Image (cartoon, rainbow, N blue to C red):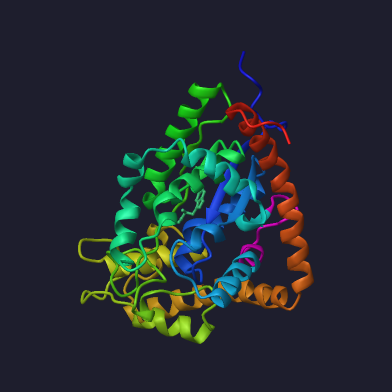
Amino acid sequence: MTENINNNTEKKRILSGIQPSGALTLGNYVGALRNFVELQEEGLYESFYMIADLHSITVRQEPKNLRKNTMDLLALFIACGLDPKKDPIFFQSHIPAHLQLSWVLTCNTYMGELSRMTQFKDKSRKHENNINAGLFTYPSLMAADILLYQADLVPVGEDQRQHLELTRDLANRFNNLYSETFKIPEAYTPKVGARIMSLQDPTQKMSKSDPNENSYILLLDPIDKAVKKIKRAVTDSEACVKRGEGKDGVMNLMSIYSAATNKSFDEIELEFEGKGYGDFKAAVAEAVAYTLKPIQERYNDLMKNKDYLEEVYKESAARASYVANKTLSKVYRKVGFVQP
Ligand code: TRP
C-alpha cells in the first residue's frame, strides 16, 4: 500500500540549509555549525548541507559578494570541522530539482498561506522597493529543499518554524492528493544550543545585520579585532561574574566562555570569584581567540586550494542530485507529466 519512501540506509536524514547572505558570526558557530560537526561525529544521521544561494536572491545581492559569500560558506563549513566525504555540502543552484519541485509545490500552495508568513511580512517591510514574487513564494522553495531529500529532521531557528510547518502541510496535502510520496519532516532541536547574544545589546541575538560592528564577532574577524570587541562588550556595574537579574551582558559572555571552554556556569562563577570584569573579559577574549584561530587557519588554507573546493561542491552536488532526482521523478510521474 504505502510505497517505500525511506532511504536505503537505516539512518535518519537531516537537511540543513543556510543562506550565504554574509559572513558567519560566532553565534552561528556556537548555535549551529558546532552542532553540525558534533552530529557528524556521532554518525547517527545522514546529513545534507545545503548552501541556499537561490534563496539569497529574494533580496538584492551584489553578484561578486554573493559568489564570495557562497564559496566562503563552503570553506567555513569545512574549516569548522565538517567532513564533506561523510556528508555532502552543496550549492542549491547546482541542483535544478530544487526549482523543479518548487514549481509543483507552488501550484499546491495557497496565496493565503504564503500571505500569513511572518518572514514575508517582515522582509517586505525591510525591502519596500523590492517586494518581488520570489520573496513571496520562498517558502515553497524551502519546502522543496526539504522534501526532495525525504528529510526526517530539519534544524531550524525560531524564525524558520512557520516555514517548516508549511512544509509539513504541503507534504501532507501532496500525499493525500497523489498517494504517499513525501516524508513528513520534523524540527530538530539540538541538545546544546547556547544562544549567543549581541555584545552591545544582550537582549538581541548576535547578528551580522546589526549596524553596530561591535555587537558581533565574525568567524573571520582578525583576532585582535575580536579581542577588542569582547573588551568593549556591555556588562553591568556590579563587577561580579555570576548569573542574575540585569546581568544579561555578563551571562552572554559566560555563554561564550562556556561554549569555548566547555566549562559549566557553576565552574565559571567559581573560577572568577572575587575577580573583576577586566580579568573575566581577558579570559573570554583568549578563549575566543583560541576557538577562532584554527578555523581561520584552515579557512585560509582552503581558500588557497580552489581545486579542492571545486571538487567538494561538484561531488556533493552529484551525491545530492541522485537523491533529489529520485524524489522529483516520482513527483513528476504522480502529477501526470509524461515520462521524458
Ligand atoms: N530559509 C532558511 C533561512 O533563511 C534557509 C533555508 C533554505 C533552509 N532552505 C532551507 C533551512 C531548508 C532549512 C531547510 O535561514
Q: Residue at x 47, y 42 (%)?
A: 106
Quarter of the image where the N terminus is located = top right
Residue 62 location, x and y as percent? 51, 75
Q: Residue at x 51, y 68 (%)?
A: 24
Instruction: Give yes or no for residue 80 being in the magenta stretch.
Output: yes
Instruction: Give yes or no for residue 337 being in the magenta stretch.
Output: no
Q: Note whether 145 is above or below 25 in the view shown.
A: above
Q: Residue at x 35, y 42 (%)?
A: 111
What secondary structure predominates along the stretch shown in magenta? loop
Kindly indicate the quadrant of the structure image that contains residue 128.
Answer: bottom left
Q: Is residue 254 left or right of residue 33?
A: left
Q: Note whether 260 is above or below 86 in the view shown.
A: below
Query: Does residue 163 appear anywhere in the picture?
Result: yes
* Foreground residue among 53 and 75: 53
Q: Residue at x 34, y 60 (%)?
A: 123
Quarter of the image where the C terminus is located = top right
* Foreground residue among 262 and 124: 124
Query: Does residue 190 appear anywhere in the picture?
Result: no
Residue range in magenta is 76-88
Residue 134 location, x and y as percent? 44, 55
Residue 60 location, x and y as percent? 45, 69
Q: How many marks?
A: 0
* Foreground residue among 205 and 117: 117
Kindly indicate the quadrant of the structure image that contains residue 168.
Answer: top left
Q: Is residue 137 left or right of residue 328?
A: left
